[in-house]
Image (cartoon, rainbow, N blue to C red):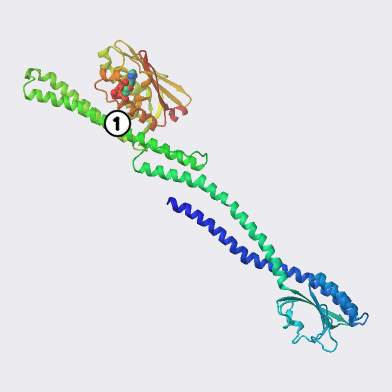
Amino acid sequence: MRKTLYLKFVLAYIIFGVFGFIVVATFVSSMTTEQLRREKADALYKEATLIANTYASDLYNTVTTLDVVQSQLGALSTYLSATIWIINPSGRMILDSSQKLDVENEVVVEGFDPTVTAGSYYTIGNFFHSFDEEMLSVFAPITSEFKVRGYVVIHTSMNDIYATSNGLLNISYITLCILFLLSLIILIFFTEMVYIPLRKITEATEQYAAGNMHYEFSVESEDEMGYLAASLSYMASEMARFEDNQKKFVANVSHDFRSPLTSIRGYLEAMLDGTIPPEAYDKYLNIVLNETTRLTKLTNSLLTLNNLNTKGMLLNKTDFDINKVIRNTAATCEGTCRQKNIAIELILTGESMYVNADMEKIQQVLYNLIDNAIKFSHHNSVIKIETTEKGNKIFISVKDNGIGIPKDDLKLIWDRFYKSDSSRGKDKKGTGLGLSITREIIHSHGEHINVISTEGVGSEFIFSLAKSAMEDED
Ligand code: ADP
């Protein structure tokens, strides 16, 4: 493909050149000759008419003598590079500017027929076999008393016209050659701006197709080619990132499944071989149960994420009171809060506040955020949940005074399976999928979620929801 594109362009260039020459050699050549012939014929016709109306009619009217006219026409014929004849309608030569006629041997143009011009005023040929070469012969009748007395015929060689035409044609050929050479610039531009970048792009595509996603190339132009190359290299880097993420994801899933399974297996084996005595079964079976709960949670989270990822996720949007949902979710967490003596403070704007969203999914978002806040809060602390109204948006914030998130981790917490090192120790049940799911849900609503956090001070997660149109009407 690469070679043929270039060859095609070169071929087009050669075809352009060849056609140019053919056109100049045929059309332009014949047009130039035709134009010159017509111009010459016109000029000579004017001369012939002038002669017919002056010298020739004077001759017929015997105002002047043959010798006088002969010398006058002789001079004129030299000036015109032509031969001037005066002939009778029968074809008998009266005067020939090129030679003095012998009175004894009259010259007759055999077969002379004045209608030979067929409506035109000139003819091309050997003029009734009078010449050996091709001549342009122009006619003008000599009339006196409404009768045609004879004709003035001016002959000029066609070779002169052909020579002038060839001279002009040479100029056309030279112009064409210059144009042809100048159009080489287009070929150079094409090579530089299209062919070389295209080759680089094709090479890169081949590398990417072969799986070498980290292949680097650059096309330094700011036109469409540069844009295409930049897009391609961006696409490759995104694919490489996607591939890396995919690998990390599989590694994380496998790891997160393997550790509870290993511990379950360990405890069960220990029970079977008697390492764990029957009286301790209760304690260890509870651990096993906890691990299976974690596995179920992990599987459920994975399924949720998978469903959320499918583009065009179906949202069951309704108008509901977000204050009520916050109160209910906070109430379900009461049990866990009590264990750590944590209080949840609700600072809700208005008695009710209607939003338009998928209630179940927003409930899950709230649950994830409150669950995290409790998990990462210190004992005897307060978690604040606040709603604020701004324009046609409602902002919901969940704020804790817990361990906070290190600055470097802030961007990573949204990644699947991400758990900060500090939380890995403290939070054994966490899957690292909660915030991923939360963000997917908020984004699928076309809304945003943000976090403000200081390590050792606390964290605040804020997300927006669309205010219900129903509320505006009230
Ligand atoms: P998990 O289900 O394990 O909690 P998340 O995706 O919800 O996973 O959270 C990912 C990580 O973000 C947590 O492991 C923790 O390090 C950090 N994080 C989330 N919420 C908070 C918070 N309120 N305070 C401190 N760290 C948090």
Which quadrant of the structure image shows residue 302? top left
Residue lying furthest right: 63
Q: Is residue 378 above or below residue 208?
A: above
Q: Is 189 placed above or below 366 here?
A: below
Closest to the observer: 305 or 198? Answer: 198
Q: Residue at x 62, y 67 (%)?
A: 26
In the picture provided, is 366 more to the left or to the right than 167? left
Question: Which of 270 and 101 lies nearest the eye of the viewer?
Answer: 101
Q: Can residue 367 be seen?
A: no
Classify mark 1 as within 8 Å of ligand 1 or not, answering yes or no: no
- Could you tell me residue 251's position as x and y percent? 26, 31
Asked if 257 appears above or below 136 in the picture, the reply is above
The residue at the far top in this view is: 380
Residue 76: percent from the left, percent from the top? 84, 72
Q: Nearer the viewer, residue 286 or 228?
A: 228
Callout 1 environment at 10 Å: few (<14), some (14 to 19), or many (20+)? some
* x and y percentages locating residue 450 in the rendered image: 40, 23
Mark 1 highlights which residue?
A: 248
Q: Secondary structure at mark 1?
A: helix
x, y percent for residue 68:
90, 78
Q: Quadrant of ligand 1?
A: top left
Residue pictured at 89% horizontal, 80% vertical: 67
In the rendered image, the vertical position of residue 321 relative to residue 404, given as above or below: below
How many marks the image carries: the answer is: 1
The reply to whether residue 154 is in sight is yes
Q: Quadrant of residue 81?
A: bottom right
Could you tell whether 188 is left or right of 363 in the image?
Answer: right
Q: What residue is at 50 percent from the left and 53 percent from the top?
A: 9
The amino acid at mark 1 is Lys
Q: Residue at x 43, y 43 (%)?
A: 201
- Answer left or right for 468 relative to 13: left
> Which image quadrant is residue 354 in?
top left
